[in-house]
Image (tube, rainbow, N blue to C red):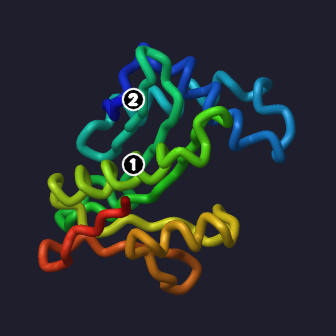
Amino acid sequence: MYIDTASTSDISALCDLASLLETQEGDFFGRRHQQVRRLGNLLLAKEHALVLCIRDQEEVIAMLTLSSLNPGSDQPAIMRLNDMAVLPAYQGQGAGSMLLQAAINQARQAGWSKIVVHQTDINPTIQQQLSRFGFSPAGQQIQLSLRADKASLSVA
């Protein structure tokens, strides 16, 4: 398994992963064209977004997307964690943790200021997992400061 930046050729596999997140919201496949467009836009907005995946051989088995909440601003980017999904066969094996750590590292290298997750977007179990990476509650969101003076966190 290895972490890679997703490309437009991965959009179908990324949509399949994203559909795992949508099972509770009804007819995802009726909205697949919207998901294809959204992921395509994220992949093209390299300065304002990040789409990472984990591959096992060439199969995309996990994905994570971040997008800027303040594109075009003179301030360092505030990134929103949009999606994170792992194929069921790979869950519980550390793929999600590896992906999140890679995203945090790349966000720091890019000079982004923080990563935020809206609390309504996650369940308590995910919130607890994010806290292991240094995310902490801040109003209606959970956030991780990426300032250079913060030590890099690593989860084994």
What residue is shown at x 56% (from left), y 24% (from top)? 36
Where residue 65 sits in the image (x, y, percent)? 45, 44
Residue that carries the numbered disc 1 in the rendered image:
98
Q: Considering only vertical position in the picture, is 118 above or below 95?
A: below
Secondary structure of the residue carrying tag 2 is loop
Corner quadrant of residue 18: top right
Residue 2 vs residue 14, the one in the foreground = 2
Where residue 134 sits in the image (x, y, percent)? 38, 75
Q: Considering only vertical position in the picture, is 76 above or below 37?
A: below
What residue is shown at x 47% (from left), y 56% (from top)? 81
Residue type indicated by callout 2: Met
Residue that carries the numbered disc 2 in the rendered image:
1
Tag 2–tag 1 contact (CB < 8 Å): yes
Tell me the quarter of the image containing the N terminus.
Answer: top left
Residue 55 vs residue 40, the one in the foreground = 55
What residue is shown at x 37% (from left), y 27% (from top)? 6
Q: Which of marks 2 and 1 is nearer the N terminus?
A: 2
What residue is shown at x 37% (from left), y 59% (from top)? 156
Secondary structure of the residue carrying tag 1 is helix
* C-alpha gap between disc 2 and disc 1: 10 Å
Q: Callout 1 environment at 10 Å: few (<14), some (14 to 19), or many (20+)?
A: some
Residue type indicated by callout 1: Met
